[in-house]
Image (spheres, grey):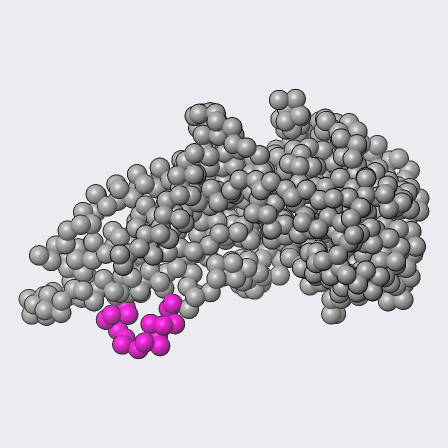
Amino acid sequence: MSRSTRTKAGAAVAAFAALTLSLTACAGETTPSASGSAGGQAAGEISYWLWDSNQKPVYQQCADAFAAANPSVKVNITQYSWDDYWTNVTNGFVAGTAPDVFTNHLSKYPEFVTQGQLEPLDEYLAADGVKTDVYQKGLADLWVAQDGKRYGLPKDFDTVAIFYNKAVLKDAGVAEADLQKLTWNPTDGGTYEKMIAHLTLDANGKRGDEAGFDKSRVKVYGLGLDGGSGGGNGQTQWSMYSGTTGWTVTDKNPWGTAYNYDKPEFQGTIAWMRSLIEKGYMPSLESVTGQSSADIFGAGKYAMITNGSWMINQMFSYKGVETGLAPTPIGPSGKRSSMYNGLADSVWVGSKNKAAAVKWVEFLGSAACQDLVGKSGVVFPAIPSGTDAASAAFAAKGIDVASSFLVHVTDGTTFLFPITDNASQVTNLMTPAVDAVFTGKARADSLTAVNEQVNALFTG
Amino acid sequence: MFIAPALLGFVVFYLYPTIRGFYFSMTQYNILGTPKWIGFDNFARIGKDPLFWNALWVTIEYVALNIGFQTVIALVLAVLMQRLTKSTVLRGALLLPWLISNVIAAMVWFWLLDYQIGLVNQFLEWTGLSRIAFFGDEFWAIPTVAFVNVWRHMGYTALLVFAGLQTIPRYVYEAASIDGSSEWSSFWRMTLPLLRPVLAMILVITVTGSFQVFDTVAVTTRGGPVNVTRVIQYYIYQKGFAEGQFGYASALSVVLFLILAVMAALQLRLLRAGESDLA
């Protein structure tokens, strides 16, 4: 999911090559953080960063509401796109210009805690009598680090579902209701794979389950692939399948210290994904490198894609494509499964105005702000009343999120995004390794050896 | 006195960071902690790092393709510009790709060459050929990245060569044509040898720049699939900015610096860039 230098000047050779060095050497020394005082009077200006441009307007509404209640505090909101966001946050830590409060992600925050960049919130919350048990189950626990301290208040969460192209279903003679009860297993893919095969169409008009299907000239793929193999967590690619096999990414979550990429359940899931490519039901990894499956879906080339709830508004905005929603298939466990990723707002340890920063985080984590966010129908707020408001707002737009995305929350079929140390190193090991299985260069059991490398990060 | 601003800029923005880079390469350092001196350990690790060797090989493959095509095309364009047209509009048009930012150029080509919805692949299929996963295929990925940058830089390189052509006096050509030399042999026997000092400088600049390819990869393939486009600069970026291993990333940068310095020195010496045949 996640995912810069330029300039070629004509100068002396030495200066040229020196550019290479300065790229990595621009890191300075840590700025000692200013010590803030808890419980002080909140006043002054604070900065707040987020990465989703769709959410900026509604957070401005929250900031206006906050300003009405705290006239002496002004919140300045800045938005950067995902890629720039994390570079700017990290550079800000070093340069002393990081925002007072920022939207934080589970894949990033453990490293920030290790680096001592986040302000523990426990004392402030206790002093202000703020409760952390008001959120959807499990979300608040994610933001308590290994030191037992809390580094964020939940704001919203996401789950995964199937988006489908209504016209493609109709052409294939498939009723939309048929997508609601699909079952999957890693051996033959169950009724889910049969559906994917049937929805696949080649240039000669033959379907994937018909004799004479030409897998080298596919016009519409039954299932899209989101930009790559998904690396070590496959959030939008395969986590909704592996989660139904009883497999967990790590030994415990959060703060596991051993990964389970050597288990047959996981490797079976990856092998099944590869088999879809070989059969021509899903595009090859080579053909989707760097893409977003949503763009290709929007061009009408996919019958179904699996993607996250943060994509809902984009997926329903394509001209000429009528989009529908279905839950992910039921797996060997007899249940569905979805990765459950929660965002939170954190306070930077170097904030010059921690009193105001904490007040803003408390407001962002309150029903007052989250109900506003819910009503805007962009994401699912972490407070149940906010989630309900979002569900109603989507329903008003004709988008049924209750039976697709939120069914996981209602049924308790979510599993938490794996949180461990060394997250980025794990990603950089696992992405090429899972890529290699998807392209057929390696067998799924090759991941056992990579798992040893991954786990060595935690013992070394 | 008058070079003071430039000198200051050089010291602050080049010299100091470079020296610091050398220092960091001898440390274990994650951007927010204190650097810990570990001597040459990082370099020993680089020697045993298969991803580094892969990155070096991928980068060399890229540079060979990029510089090979770019230099030949630029030379042809420059000669055509000099011999066939005096139109500044036409000469200016050749520079257009270079005026587009690297990232935009990469994105535009990324979509044009997309396997499923790209214009180029739709054309290929229309002509009866099979589609090509330009950025994703193991064989095509590096040539494709190289092609995008050849397209973007050829006009600029051509302009540099063109400037070199202008320094060759007209009387040489006049004398040659009186002696009955054809256009073709004039090019090989006069133009090319007399261009040698200019070409040498262009090669040093373009090879050095080419070794540092980054943005095209960062906005398209991100090093994948598997490791086929993980060029060295992108590997440095990943180690430093994604994994926070600034010490190791600095060491990788030092290795790249040494490779480039040696290559630049060799090129200048082999091509005798300091002297002209015109004398």
* Image: A431 above or below B184: above
**Quarter the C terminus of chain B occupies:** bottom left
- Apparent side of residue B172 relative to residue B164 in the rendered image (left or right): left
x, y (%) of residue A69?
84, 61
In reply to whether residue B84 is colored magenta, the answer given is: yes
Secondary structure mostly taken by the magenta-highlighted segment of the chain = helix
Give the residue drawn at x 72%, y 27%.
Answer: A257
A452 and A102: which is toward the camera:
A102
**Quarter the N terminus of chain B occupies:** bottom left
The outermost residue toward the front is A41
A303 and A122: which is toward the camera:
A122
x, y (%) of residue B171?
9, 69
A275 and B88: which is toward the camera:
B88
x, y (%) of residue B150?
40, 57
Q: Where on the picture, by quarter, is residue A191? A: top right
- Apparent side of residue A309 relative to residue B270 in the rendered image (left or right): right
x, y (%) of residue B100?
46, 65
* Image: B257 above or below A445: below
- Magenta highlight range: B80-95
- Is any part of residue B217 visible from this angle? yes
B210 and A350: which is toward the camera:
A350
- Is any part of residue B207 visible from this angle? no
Q: How many marks?
A: 0
Give the residue drawn at x 37%, y 44%.
Answer: B15
Give the residue drawn at x 35%, y 62%.
Answer: B156
In reply to whether residue A435 is colored magenta, the answer given is: no
* Image: B89 above or below A367: below
Q: Where on the picture, by quarter, is residue B125? A: bottom right
Give the residue drawn at x 18%, y 50%.
Answer: B274
